[in-house]
Amino acid sequence: MKIERAEVIVTSPNRNFVTLRLQTDDGLVGLGDATLNGRELAVVAYLKEHVVPLLLGTDASRIEDTWQFLYRGAYWRRGPVTMAAIAAVDMALWDIKGKAANMPVYQLLGGASRDGLMAYGHASGPDLPSLFDSIREHQEMGYRSIRVQTGVPGLRAIYGIAAQSALDGGEERYDHEPARRGAYPTQEDWDTRAYLRHLPTVFEAVRNEFGPSMPLLHDGHHRMTPIQAAKLGKALEPYDLFWLEDCTPAENQEALRLVRQHTTTPLAIGEVFNTIWDFQTLITEQLIDYVRAASTHFGGISPLKKVMDFAAQYQIKSGCHGPTDISPVGFAAQLHVGLAIHNFGIQEYMPHGARTNATFKQSMTFENGMLHPGDNPGLGVELDVDEAGKYPYEQAYLPFNRLADGTIHDW
Ligand code: GCO
Ligand code: MG
Protein backbone atom coordinates (compact mmCIF):
# COMPACT_ATOMS: atom_id res chain seq x y z
CA MET A 1 0.00 0.00 0.00
CA LYS A 2 2.32 2.72 -1.28
CA ILE A 3 1.46 6.39 -1.80
CA GLU A 4 1.42 6.84 -5.55
CA ARG A 5 -0.14 10.29 -5.97
CA ALA A 6 -0.36 13.33 -3.71
CA GLU A 7 -2.23 16.45 -4.75
CA VAL A 8 -2.92 19.68 -2.90
CA ILE A 9 -6.36 20.95 -3.89
CA VAL A 10 -7.35 24.55 -3.17
CA THR A 11 -11.01 25.40 -3.58
CA SER A 12 -13.26 28.24 -2.49
CA PRO A 13 -16.87 27.06 -2.82
CA ASN A 14 -18.10 29.37 -0.06
CA ARG A 15 -14.73 30.06 1.54
CA ASN A 16 -11.16 28.82 1.03
CA PHE A 17 -10.19 25.24 1.79
CA VAL A 18 -6.90 23.41 1.32
CA THR A 19 -7.17 19.64 0.99
CA LEU A 20 -4.45 17.02 0.61
CA ARG A 21 -5.55 14.08 -1.54
CA LEU A 22 -3.40 10.97 -1.33
CA GLN A 23 -3.85 7.94 -3.55
CA THR A 24 -2.26 4.53 -3.03
CA ASP A 25 -1.03 2.10 -5.67
CA ASP A 26 -4.04 -0.10 -4.88
CA GLY A 27 -6.43 2.75 -5.65
CA LEU A 28 -7.42 3.94 -2.15
CA VAL A 29 -7.93 7.68 -1.72
CA GLY A 30 -7.39 9.57 1.55
CA LEU A 31 -8.26 13.20 2.30
CA GLY A 32 -6.72 15.60 4.82
CA ASP A 33 -7.63 19.17 5.77
CA ALA A 34 -4.82 21.76 5.75
CA THR A 35 -6.91 24.94 5.87
CA LEU A 36 -5.33 27.82 7.82
CA ASN A 37 -7.84 30.66 7.68
CA GLY A 38 -6.32 33.81 6.14
CA ARG A 39 -2.88 32.21 5.56
CA GLU A 40 -3.98 29.31 3.33
CA LEU A 41 -1.32 29.51 0.64
CA ALA A 42 1.56 29.24 3.10
CA VAL A 43 0.40 25.70 3.92
CA VAL A 44 -0.08 24.93 0.22
CA ALA A 45 3.58 25.83 -0.41
CA TYR A 46 4.77 23.85 2.65
CA LEU A 47 2.93 20.77 1.43
CA LYS A 48 3.76 21.05 -2.26
CA GLU A 49 7.40 22.03 -1.92
CA HIS A 50 8.46 20.10 1.14
CA VAL A 51 6.06 17.30 2.07
CA VAL A 52 4.55 15.80 -1.08
CA PRO A 53 7.98 14.88 -2.54
CA LEU A 54 8.79 12.99 0.69
CA LEU A 55 5.54 11.02 0.66
CA LEU A 56 5.62 9.55 -2.83
CA GLY A 57 6.54 5.86 -2.75
CA THR A 58 6.20 5.54 1.05
CA ASP A 59 4.07 3.01 2.94
CA ALA A 60 0.60 4.50 3.54
CA SER A 61 -0.08 2.16 6.46
CA ARG A 62 2.63 3.75 8.68
CA ILE A 63 0.66 6.64 10.19
CA GLU A 64 2.62 7.16 13.40
CA ASP A 65 5.99 6.75 11.75
CA THR A 66 5.10 9.23 8.99
CA TRP A 67 3.88 11.74 11.60
CA GLN A 68 7.13 11.44 13.59
CA PHE A 69 9.22 11.70 10.43
CA LEU A 70 7.50 14.94 9.37
CA TYR A 71 7.57 16.42 12.92
CA ARG A 72 11.01 15.39 14.15
CA GLY A 73 12.71 15.12 10.77
CA ALA A 74 12.07 18.76 9.85
CA TYR A 75 14.12 19.96 12.86
CA TRP A 76 11.85 23.10 12.99
CA ARG A 77 8.93 21.97 15.07
CA ARG A 78 5.45 23.29 15.79
CA GLY A 79 3.73 26.40 14.42
CA PRO A 80 0.37 26.60 12.62
CA VAL A 81 1.74 26.18 9.08
CA THR A 82 3.84 23.10 9.89
CA MET A 83 1.16 21.49 12.04
CA ALA A 84 -1.66 22.08 9.54
CA ALA A 85 0.48 20.44 6.86
CA ILE A 86 1.27 17.44 9.10
CA ALA A 87 -2.42 17.27 10.11
CA ALA A 88 -3.47 16.86 6.48
CA VAL A 89 -1.08 13.93 5.98
CA ASP A 90 -2.16 12.28 9.25
CA MET A 91 -5.89 12.58 8.43
CA ALA A 92 -5.42 11.30 4.88
CA LEU A 93 -3.53 8.26 6.18
CA TRP A 94 -6.24 7.48 8.76
CA ASP A 95 -8.83 7.85 5.95
CA ILE A 96 -6.88 5.34 3.85
CA LYS A 97 -6.45 2.95 6.78
CA GLY A 98 -10.19 3.04 7.43
CA LYS A 99 -10.95 2.32 3.78
CA ALA A 100 -8.40 -0.51 3.74
CA ALA A 101 -10.04 -2.01 6.86
CA ASN A 102 -13.55 -1.23 5.54
CA MET A 103 -14.33 0.54 8.83
CA PRO A 104 -15.09 4.10 9.90
CA VAL A 105 -12.08 5.70 11.60
CA TYR A 106 -13.78 5.79 15.02
CA GLN A 107 -13.77 1.97 15.02
CA LEU A 108 -10.00 2.00 14.58
CA LEU A 109 -9.71 4.42 17.52
CA GLY A 110 -11.47 1.99 19.87
CA GLY A 111 -15.10 2.13 18.77
CA ALA A 112 -17.98 4.37 19.84
CA SER A 113 -18.15 5.49 23.47
CA ARG A 114 -21.57 7.13 22.98
CA ASP A 115 -24.50 7.33 20.54
CA GLY A 116 -23.75 10.84 19.25
CA LEU A 117 -21.93 14.08 20.00
CA MET A 118 -23.69 17.05 21.60
CA ALA A 119 -23.15 20.11 19.41
CA TYR A 120 -23.32 23.81 20.17
CA GLY A 121 -24.28 26.52 17.68
CA HIS A 122 -23.55 30.24 17.47
CA ALA A 123 -26.31 32.67 18.36
CA SER A 124 -25.56 36.37 18.14
CA GLY A 125 -27.19 39.77 17.86
CA PRO A 126 -26.34 43.42 18.33
CA ASP A 127 -29.16 43.81 20.89
CA LEU A 128 -31.32 41.55 23.07
CA PRO A 129 -34.33 41.13 20.69
CA SER A 130 -32.12 40.05 17.78
CA LEU A 131 -30.05 37.83 20.07
CA PHE A 132 -33.22 36.11 21.37
CA ASP A 133 -34.39 35.58 17.76
CA SER A 134 -31.05 34.04 16.90
CA ILE A 135 -31.23 31.71 19.93
CA ARG A 136 -34.74 30.59 18.89
CA GLU A 137 -33.58 29.98 15.30
CA HIS A 138 -30.80 27.76 16.62
CA GLN A 139 -33.24 25.84 18.83
CA GLU A 140 -35.42 25.27 15.76
CA MET A 141 -32.37 23.91 13.92
CA GLY A 142 -32.09 21.35 16.74
CA TYR A 143 -29.32 22.85 18.84
CA ARG A 144 -29.64 22.24 22.57
CA SER A 145 -26.49 24.10 23.55
CA ILE A 146 -25.84 27.65 22.38
CA ARG A 147 -22.94 30.09 22.28
CA VAL A 148 -24.07 33.64 23.01
CA GLN A 149 -22.21 36.63 21.52
CA THR A 150 -23.61 40.13 21.67
CA GLY A 151 -23.03 43.72 20.63
CA VAL A 152 -21.60 46.12 23.20
CA PRO A 153 -23.18 49.59 23.50
CA GLY A 154 -20.85 52.21 22.04
CA LEU A 155 -18.96 49.78 19.81
CA ARG A 156 -19.86 49.88 16.13
CA ALA A 157 -18.70 46.46 14.97
CA ILE A 158 -17.20 43.57 16.92
CA TYR A 159 -16.33 40.05 15.93
CA GLY A 160 -18.90 37.33 16.28
CA ILE A 161 -22.03 39.43 15.77
CA ALA A 162 -23.85 38.66 12.54
CA ALA A 163 -25.78 41.90 11.96
CA GLN A 164 -22.80 44.09 12.86
CA SER A 165 -20.65 42.43 10.22
CA ALA A 166 -23.38 43.18 7.70
CA LEU A 167 -23.16 46.87 8.61
CA ASP A 168 -19.54 46.75 7.64
CA GLY A 169 -20.29 45.43 4.18
CA GLY A 170 -19.70 41.86 5.39
CA GLU A 171 -22.05 38.95 5.15
CA GLU A 172 -24.98 38.67 7.49
CA ARG A 173 -23.61 35.56 9.20
CA TYR A 174 -20.24 36.79 10.39
CA ASP A 175 -18.29 33.58 10.58
CA HIS A 176 -20.47 31.63 8.25
CA GLU A 177 -19.79 30.94 4.61
CA PRO A 178 -19.06 32.90 2.47
CA ALA A 179 -16.08 34.42 4.23
CA ARG A 180 -15.38 38.10 3.79
CA ARG A 181 -13.19 38.14 0.74
CA GLY A 182 -10.93 41.04 -0.11
CA ALA A 183 -7.35 42.22 -0.23
CA TYR A 184 -7.28 43.76 3.26
CA PRO A 185 -8.84 42.71 6.58
CA THR A 186 -11.84 44.60 7.94
CA GLN A 187 -11.21 46.75 11.01
CA GLU A 188 -13.47 46.34 14.05
CA ASP A 189 -13.70 48.09 17.45
CA TRP A 190 -12.87 47.04 20.98
CA ASP A 191 -13.25 48.32 24.56
CA THR A 192 -12.77 45.70 27.29
CA ARG A 193 -14.26 47.79 30.13
CA ALA A 194 -17.47 48.41 28.16
CA TYR A 195 -17.65 44.69 27.35
CA LEU A 196 -17.15 43.66 30.99
CA ARG A 197 -19.92 46.01 32.13
CA HIS A 198 -22.36 44.81 29.49
CA LEU A 199 -21.92 41.04 29.18
CA PRO A 200 -23.32 39.92 32.58
CA THR A 201 -26.53 41.89 31.88
CA VAL A 202 -26.94 39.96 28.62
CA PHE A 203 -26.56 36.57 30.30
CA GLU A 204 -29.02 37.61 32.99
CA ALA A 205 -31.57 38.52 30.30
CA VAL A 206 -30.96 35.27 28.40
CA ARG A 207 -31.44 33.16 31.54
CA ASN A 208 -34.64 35.08 32.39
CA GLU A 209 -36.00 34.48 28.88
CA PHE A 210 -34.85 30.89 28.26
CA GLY A 211 -34.68 29.40 31.77
CA PRO A 212 -31.90 27.76 33.76
CA SER A 213 -31.26 24.50 31.93
CA MET A 214 -29.94 25.27 28.41
CA PRO A 215 -26.13 24.98 28.25
CA LEU A 216 -24.81 28.47 27.35
CA LEU A 217 -21.30 29.24 26.15
CA HIS A 218 -19.35 32.43 25.47
CA ASP A 219 -16.12 33.20 23.58
CA GLY A 220 -13.83 35.95 24.94
CA HIS A 221 -11.45 35.76 21.93
CA HIS A 222 -8.28 36.22 24.00
CA ARG A 223 -9.09 39.86 24.72
CA MET A 224 -8.79 40.09 28.50
CA THR A 225 -5.93 40.35 30.94
CA PRO A 226 -5.90 37.66 33.67
CA ILE A 227 -7.50 39.97 36.26
CA GLN A 228 -10.19 41.07 33.79
CA ALA A 229 -10.90 37.44 32.93
CA ALA A 230 -11.14 36.57 36.63
CA LYS A 231 -13.62 39.41 37.10
CA LEU A 232 -15.76 38.30 34.17
CA GLY A 233 -15.77 34.64 35.22
CA LYS A 234 -16.92 35.67 38.69
CA ALA A 235 -19.60 38.03 37.34
CA LEU A 236 -21.00 35.25 35.11
CA GLU A 237 -21.21 32.61 37.86
CA PRO A 238 -24.93 33.22 38.60
CA TYR A 239 -25.76 32.34 34.96
CA ASP A 240 -24.13 28.90 35.11
CA LEU A 241 -22.15 28.93 31.84
CA PHE A 242 -21.15 25.65 30.21
CA TRP A 243 -17.86 27.44 29.47
CA LEU A 244 -16.07 30.73 29.04
CA GLU A 245 -13.73 30.35 26.07
CA ASP A 246 -10.33 31.93 25.37
CA CYS A 247 -10.54 34.45 28.19
CA THR A 248 -6.83 35.38 27.88
CA PRO A 249 -4.15 34.94 25.16
CA ALA A 250 -3.18 31.58 26.61
CA GLU A 251 0.29 31.20 25.17
CA ASN A 252 1.02 32.44 28.71
CA GLN A 253 -0.39 29.33 30.36
CA GLU A 254 0.54 30.48 33.88
CA ALA A 255 -1.89 33.41 33.57
CA LEU A 256 -4.73 30.95 34.00
CA ARG A 257 -3.67 30.27 37.61
CA LEU A 258 -4.92 33.70 38.58
CA VAL A 259 -8.19 33.32 36.65
CA ARG A 260 -8.80 29.89 38.15
CA GLN A 261 -8.28 31.05 41.73
CA HIS A 262 -11.10 33.56 41.38
CA THR A 263 -13.88 31.82 39.52
CA THR A 264 -15.79 28.56 39.21
CA THR A 265 -16.97 29.40 35.66
CA PRO A 266 -15.63 26.50 33.52
CA LEU A 267 -12.85 27.47 31.10
CA ALA A 268 -12.13 26.29 27.55
CA ILE A 269 -8.94 27.10 25.65
CA GLY A 270 -6.84 25.97 22.70
CA GLU A 271 -8.27 26.58 19.23
CA VAL A 272 -5.05 28.31 18.15
CA PHE A 273 -2.76 25.76 19.82
CA ASN A 274 -0.59 23.47 17.70
CA THR A 275 0.85 20.84 20.03
CA ILE A 276 0.30 19.06 23.31
CA TRP A 277 3.00 21.28 24.88
CA ASP A 278 0.70 24.29 24.55
CA PHE A 279 -1.60 22.51 27.01
CA GLN A 280 1.01 21.13 29.41
CA THR A 281 0.53 23.51 32.36
CA LEU A 282 -3.16 23.97 31.63
CA ILE A 283 -3.76 20.23 31.88
CA THR A 284 -1.37 19.15 34.63
CA GLU A 285 -2.49 22.00 36.94
CA GLN A 286 -6.14 21.54 35.93
CA LEU A 287 -6.42 25.20 34.91
CA ILE A 288 -9.02 24.48 32.21
CA ASP A 289 -12.05 22.23 31.84
CA TYR A 290 -12.17 21.80 28.04
CA VAL A 291 -9.51 21.31 25.36
CA ARG A 292 -10.43 23.36 22.24
CA ALA A 293 -7.81 21.90 19.87
CA ALA A 294 -8.88 21.30 16.27
CA SER A 295 -7.59 18.25 14.41
CA THR A 296 -6.60 20.53 11.49
CA HIS A 297 -4.35 22.89 13.46
CA PHE A 298 -3.03 20.36 15.95
CA GLY A 299 -1.26 17.90 13.67
CA GLY A 300 -4.23 15.65 12.93
CA ILE A 301 -6.10 12.76 14.50
CA SER A 302 -3.06 11.08 16.14
CA PRO A 303 -2.03 14.01 18.41
CA LEU A 304 -5.66 14.99 19.10
CA LYS A 305 -6.29 11.51 20.47
CA LYS A 306 -3.10 11.73 22.55
CA VAL A 307 -3.87 15.11 24.11
CA MET A 308 -7.40 13.94 24.97
CA ASP A 309 -6.06 10.77 26.62
CA PHE A 310 -3.62 12.96 28.61
CA ALA A 311 -6.45 15.37 29.57
CA ALA A 312 -8.66 12.45 30.64
CA GLN A 313 -6.34 11.72 33.56
CA TYR A 314 -7.22 15.18 34.90
CA GLN A 315 -11.00 15.02 34.26
CA ILE A 316 -10.66 17.52 31.40
CA LYS A 317 -12.94 17.03 28.42
CA SER A 318 -12.97 17.84 24.71
CA GLY A 319 -14.62 20.83 23.04
CA CYS A 320 -13.04 20.80 19.58
CA HIS A 321 -12.98 23.94 17.45
CA GLY A 322 -15.61 23.59 14.71
CA PRO A 323 -16.21 26.83 12.80
CA THR A 324 -16.69 26.80 9.02
CA ASP A 325 -13.00 27.40 8.35
CA ILE A 326 -12.40 23.81 9.48
CA SER A 327 -13.24 21.93 6.26
CA PRO A 328 -15.71 19.03 6.22
CA VAL A 329 -12.65 16.74 6.20
CA GLY A 330 -11.11 18.27 9.35
CA PHE A 331 -14.53 18.33 10.97
CA ALA A 332 -15.12 14.64 10.25
CA ALA A 333 -11.68 13.83 11.68
CA GLN A 334 -12.57 15.30 15.07
CA LEU A 335 -16.03 13.70 15.06
CA HIS A 336 -14.37 10.29 14.83
CA VAL A 337 -12.08 11.15 17.77
CA GLY A 338 -14.99 12.62 19.75
CA LEU A 339 -17.11 9.51 19.29
CA ALA A 340 -14.28 7.20 20.38
CA ILE A 341 -12.77 8.93 23.42
CA HIS A 342 -14.26 8.58 26.91
CA ASN A 343 -13.80 12.26 27.83
CA PHE A 344 -15.86 13.90 25.08
CA GLY A 345 -17.42 17.18 26.24
CA ILE A 346 -19.12 19.08 23.43
CA GLN A 347 -18.50 19.81 19.73
CA GLU A 348 -18.77 23.26 18.14
CA TYR A 349 -20.77 23.02 14.91
CA MET A 350 -21.44 25.75 12.35
CA PRO A 351 -22.99 24.24 9.23
CA HIS A 352 -21.12 24.73 5.95
CA GLY A 353 -22.74 26.46 2.98
CA ALA A 354 -24.52 24.62 0.16
CA ARG A 355 -21.64 24.88 -2.35
CA THR A 356 -19.19 23.53 0.24
CA ASN A 357 -21.50 20.59 0.98
CA ALA A 358 -21.82 19.87 -2.76
CA THR A 359 -18.01 19.90 -3.12
CA PHE A 360 -17.39 17.73 -0.04
CA LYS A 361 -19.91 14.86 0.15
CA GLN A 362 -20.27 13.85 3.80
CA SER A 363 -21.67 10.88 5.70
CA MET A 364 -21.88 13.04 8.85
CA THR A 365 -25.36 13.66 10.33
CA PHE A 366 -26.83 16.31 12.67
CA GLU A 367 -30.11 15.29 14.30
CA ASN A 368 -31.77 16.58 17.46
CA GLY A 369 -28.69 18.54 18.38
CA MET A 370 -26.40 15.51 18.05
CA LEU A 371 -23.64 14.88 15.52
CA HIS A 372 -22.46 11.50 14.22
CA PRO A 373 -19.64 10.89 11.68
CA GLY A 374 -21.58 8.10 9.93
CA ASP A 375 -20.40 4.57 9.16
CA ASN A 376 -18.76 4.94 5.76
CA PRO A 377 -15.25 3.46 5.69
CA GLY A 378 -12.54 5.99 6.54
CA LEU A 379 -13.50 9.56 7.43
CA GLY A 380 -16.72 9.50 5.40
CA VAL A 381 -15.94 12.50 3.17
CA GLU A 382 -15.52 12.42 -0.62
CA LEU A 383 -14.12 15.40 -2.51
CA ASP A 384 -15.73 16.09 -5.89
CA VAL A 385 -12.63 17.28 -7.72
CA ASP A 386 -14.58 18.69 -10.72
CA GLU A 387 -16.82 20.70 -8.42
CA ALA A 388 -13.78 21.93 -6.46
CA GLY A 389 -12.18 23.07 -9.71
CA LYS A 390 -15.04 25.50 -10.34
CA TYR A 391 -14.11 27.68 -7.37
CA PRO A 392 -10.58 29.10 -7.45
CA TYR A 393 -8.90 30.58 -4.37
CA GLU A 394 -9.88 34.10 -3.40
CA GLN A 395 -7.98 36.17 -0.87
CA ALA A 396 -9.90 36.48 2.42
CA TYR A 397 -8.82 37.66 5.84
CA LEU A 398 -10.16 37.51 9.37
CA PRO A 399 -11.02 40.99 10.72
CA PHE A 400 -8.81 42.74 13.29
CA ASN A 401 -9.62 45.33 15.94
CA ARG A 402 -8.35 48.63 17.32
CA LEU A 403 -9.12 50.46 20.56
CA ALA A 404 -10.63 53.97 20.44
CA ASP A 405 -7.14 55.54 20.45
CA GLY A 406 -6.04 53.44 17.47
CA THR A 407 -4.04 50.77 19.34
CA ILE A 408 -4.29 47.29 17.83
CA HIS A 409 -5.80 44.93 20.40
CA ASP A 410 -5.63 41.14 20.88
CA TRP A 411 -7.72 39.04 18.58
C1 GCO B 1 -14.67 29.89 17.39
C2 GCO B 1 -13.60 30.73 16.84
C3 GCO B 1 -13.77 31.23 15.45
C4 GCO B 1 -12.40 31.70 14.98
C5 GCO B 1 -12.15 31.43 13.55
C6 GCO B 1 -10.73 31.75 13.17
O1 GCO B 1 -14.73 29.78 18.59
O2 GCO B 1 -15.39 29.31 16.59
O3 GCO B 1 -13.11 31.65 17.76
O4 GCO B 1 -14.75 32.20 15.40
O5 GCO B 1 -12.21 33.01 15.26
O6 GCO B 1 -12.45 30.12 13.29
O7 GCO B 1 -10.40 31.21 11.95
MG1 MG C 1 -13.22 30.69 19.67
Image (cartoon, rainbow, N blue to C red):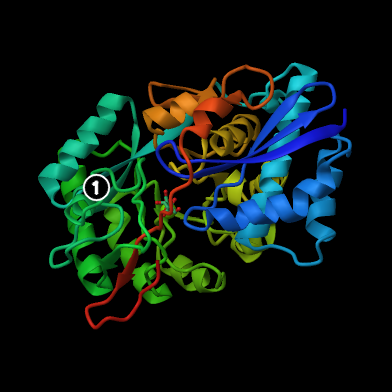
Give 204 or 27, whichever is nearer the viewer: 27
137 lies left or right of 288: left
Give 149 or 57, whichever is nearer the viewer: 57
Q: Position of residue 161 (x, y in %)?
A: 25, 51
Q: Quadrant of the C terminus?
A: bottom left
Q: Position of residue 183 (x, y in %)?
A: 38, 60
Secondary structure beneath label 1: helix
Residue under the image location 77 percent in, 34 percent down? 5
Q: Residue furthest left?
A: 129
The residue beneath circle 1 is 162
**Mark 1 CB within 8 Å of ligand 1:** no
Residue under the image location 38 percent in, 32 percent down? 353
Q: Quadrant of the N terminus?
A: top right
Q: Position of residue 370 (x, y in %)?
A: 44, 25
Above or below, 393 against 46 in this view is above
Residue 275 in view of the camera: no
Location of residue 80 (image quadrant):
bottom right
Give 107 or 145, whichever is nearer the viewer: 107
Residue under the image location 54 percent in, 36 percent down? 331
115 lies left or right of 168: right
Residue under the image location 44 percent in, 32 percent down? 356
Location of residue 351 (image quadrant):
top left
Above or below, 129 against 314 in this view is above
Tell me if mark 1 has few (under 14), some (14-19) or many (20+) residues whose alpha carbon lies within 10 angstroms of its own. many
Residue 154 in view of the camera: yes
How many marks on residues? 1
Q: Position of residue 77 (x, y in %)?
A: 74, 64
285 lies left or right of 239: right
Give 372 or 55, whichever is nearer the viewer: 55
The residue type indicated by label 1 comes to: Ala
